[in-house]
Amino acid sequence: MRYAVVTGGNKGIGFEICKQLAWKGGVLVVFTARDEKKGTEAVEKLRGCGLADRVVFHRVDVMDPHTINSLVDFIKTQFGRLDILVNNAGISGTIANTEALRAAGLNENWPHETQAGWREIMKMMMETYETAVECIQTNYYGAKRMTEALIPLLKLSESSRIVNVSSSMGTLQSIRNKWAKGVLGDGENLTEARVEEVLNQFLRDFEQGLSKAKGWPTLMPAYSVSKAALNAYTRIAAKKHPAICINCVCPGFVRTDQTFNFGDLSAEEGAASPVRLALQPHGGPSGLFFICEEVSSF
């Protein structure tokens, strides 16, 4: 029996990742969520799919080290090791401008399932300094906290995997800031300190209203920068822990509540790529960024 942890597993892509790992991979999945009630409801739904003996819920807030430590103790006591970690938990860092969305007739006129339609929706999203900080704390530092806490248990596995769910919005081509792009693109000299220097500078510029002038992404900037940083961290972690297969993946343009149900893929289809990496044979690639099933440049 293999054991997996999936963060943000109560809905959307995370829920489907849990379901597919349990069904297709024969994996016992510990899925996490911040909200106890939503997590309990999700585990009952999974058990209703015939997975009663394959799924366990454990409350974790990736921004709260105490809940992460509780999860580590639980896995250590119950299973003794961990084979798969999927860092899926993430937020958009935006607040919907509901009046603008309603005025645009989102539910009636918008061309759903198109990139163009989604980009127009993104223009109606608002970001504050506080939401930007929360986004980076969740998407980058949350994945880093989970990885660092669970590495000792992953090292006890004969064939361990870490999959970081990222986004094509985090590719370096979306960042015009030459300094940041140079730092994050320098695979040979990447360090966590340098990545976090980029994040800190982005937040300073964002707080001062200089985000656009300094060449940071214009659409969902905090989300895009957090995912670029996560991709960089993936490369660092893969080099630091060669015995563990560590990759990041964009699951595609997936219809979830975070995308207002825009997208080319269902959550089930979007989960396929992270699951494939989580279940890849021993000796598979590490330190790479995939968009769906294809290797991509960072």
Image (spheres, rainbow, N blue to C red):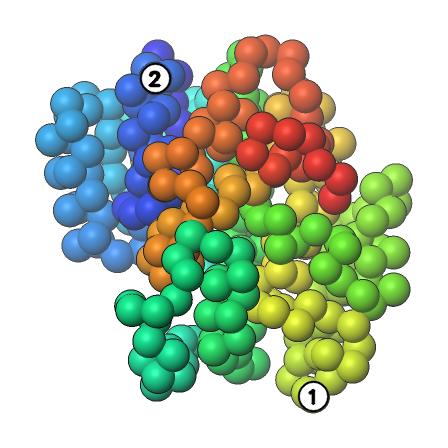
Q: Which residue is mark 1?
A: 208
Observer-side mark, 2 or 1, equals 2
Q: Position of residue 142 (x, y in %)?
A: 51, 53
- Asked if one can make out residue 187 in the rendered structure from this viewpoint, the answer is yes
189 horizontally vs 155: left or right: right
Q: Residues within 10 Å of mark 1 (few under 14, many from 20)?
A: few
Q: Residues within 10 Å of mark 2 (few under 14, many from 20)?
A: few
Point out the tag, 2 or 1, that comes first from the N-terminus.
2
42 horizontally vs 246: left or right: left
Identify the residue at image location x=29%, y=20%.
Answer: 23
Dot 2 amino acid type: Lys
The image quadrant of residue 244 is top right
Placement of the C terminus among the 4 image quadrants: top right
The image quadrant of residue 285 is top right
Identify the residue at image location x=64%, y=29%.
Answer: 294
Q: Position of residue 47 (x, y in %)?
A: 15, 30
Identify the residue at image location x=36%, y=52%.
Answer: 256
**Tag 1 secondary structure:** loop
Identify the residue at image location x=76%, y=55%.
Answer: 173
Foreground: 58 or 208?
Answer: 208
Placement of the N terminus among the 4 image quadrants: top left
58 horizontally vs 101: left or right: left
Q: Position of residue 283 (x, y in %)?
A: 65, 12
111 horizontally vs 9: left or right: right
Mark 2 near mark 1, Cβ–Cβ under 8 Å? no
Q: Which residue is mark 2?
A: 24
Up the image or down, 277 lies above or below 197; here it is above
Dot 1 amino acid type: Gln
